[in-house]
Image: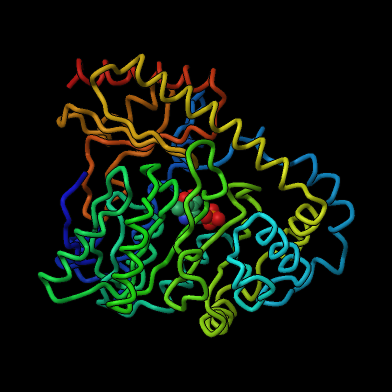
Amino acid sequence: MSTTSMHPAANSPQGSTQNSQQAPALPYASRHDQLIGSVIDASTTLLAAYDHDIVKFGMGAPAPDMLPSKDFARIAGDVFSPENFTYGETKGEPILLDALHEYLSSTGQIPPEQQGNLDRLLITSGGMQGLDLGFKLFVSPGDLVACESPTYTNGSATAMSYEAEILEVPVDEDGMQVEVLEEHTARTGRAPKVIYTVPTFQNPAGVTMSLPRRERLLSFAHKHRSVIIEDNPYGMLRFSGESLPALSDLSPNDPLIFGVRTFSKFVAPGLRVGWIDVDPEVRELAVNAKQTMDSCAAVPNQHLIARWLAEGGADSHVETLRVAYRERKMAMSAGLERLFPGEIRATDPDGGFFLWVTFEDETIDTEDLMPTALEEGVAYIPGPAFSPAGNFSNALRLCFASATPDRIDEGLERLRRAVDRYRSER
Ligand SMILES: Cc1ncc(COP(=O)(O)O)c(C=O)c1O
């Protein structure tokens, strides 16, 4: 994919050039011009302004038909009681911590060495808060943060909000090219303080880091004492291929691994509940940091999830998701092959939500294509959103999880029309 690029945060796409020419009217903190936001999140507002039908391949959200909302409606009557509408403990509601620990242990998502150990878990307000806590704890202004290229926009943007310098490390079918990170470190003599990675069903590329790369990344981190933020929202949504151990499984109880997880992708994003799985000492600091953010995650929502997990709701639900997402991904891969033969390269994920599409014609600019696509009734996220340096202008991310196979076909046909129109009109 891209070549490695050093990206001092001052290169941020918005604000900095303007600010160097003209002093800001208000006495903002130095970090203000690195609050670049997220094209992904902004797309929700953008789409709300359209009143014609749009097939939404943009946001990485489960479709409404994939949410356990009937279970929630039933459970809500019990758990939405007055005592659950007050402040809760910052570390999370004990009932949720217990149910989560039980679920993770019974599904092999906590290494045996860590089982029975609740002092590693902290309930957060979504995966985003986990990322914020990780970067807040480990990044000082000017620190080098390595991320994948392409990377999850909100992750790199969070690092930038703490005034990190970003190093983009290219990704291929086997995930982050750790050897490029090693070469860069040897050449510059500067190792990243933090490595941000989504090793499993990566956002946006959908690829999974191979076992040798995982081992190599851990060796690199141990050698240089780099913290790894392992962001893993999609790991349990595997629908084909062999399971791979998480970095935290390969190196249990490793204080350098900061695990970020969320209920958003396998339960419901609107609940805004996630968790971190970190060294107990790190967790103490994270509790302090969270107390200056929001005191605690939404208490009624924590009880809702706790009850749902405790009654076994997740087991059949996750299986339903795997079956549906496999079908949707196959529909999307087949549709792309049928409608764009020889014109694109697309990744072939074994799980998660996303396909990454690159046009062979490098003059296609997916940001420029976007207005035509929206007019035709299809939304995606343009490639440059996933690179702090703005690479990948001829690529785009498609979410296959949000639409049924029929809607996927419809959306891809609209995309086909949009590309044809864009080509003939430019
Ligand atoms: C890789 C990755 N990390 C973190 C998040 C944020 O999760 P949440 O919606 O729970 O804040 C997402 C959501 O899209 C994601 O894809």
Relative placement, left or right, of 23 versus 411 is left
The one nearer the camera, 388 or 422, is: 388
- Give residue 373's position: percent from left, percent from top: 36, 25
Q: Is residue 264 left or right of residue 315?
A: left
The vertical placement of 210 against 331, above or below, is below
Examine the image and state in which quarter residue 159 appears: bottom left
| Residue 374 in sight from this viewpoint | yes
Q: Is residue 377 above or below residue 170?
A: above
Residue 205: quadrant of the picture: top left
Residue drawn at x 27%, y 29% is: 345
Residue plotted at (32% across, 39% down): 382
Left or right side of 93 for 175: left
Residue 25 visible to the viewer: no
- Residue 57: image quadrant is top left
Q: Quadrant of the N terminus?
A: top left
User: Looking at the image, which residue is at 59% across and 51% down?
Assistant: 264
x and y percentages locating residue 109 in the rendered image:
60, 59
Residue positioned 64% across, 79% down in the render: 119
Q: Residue furthest left?
A: 187
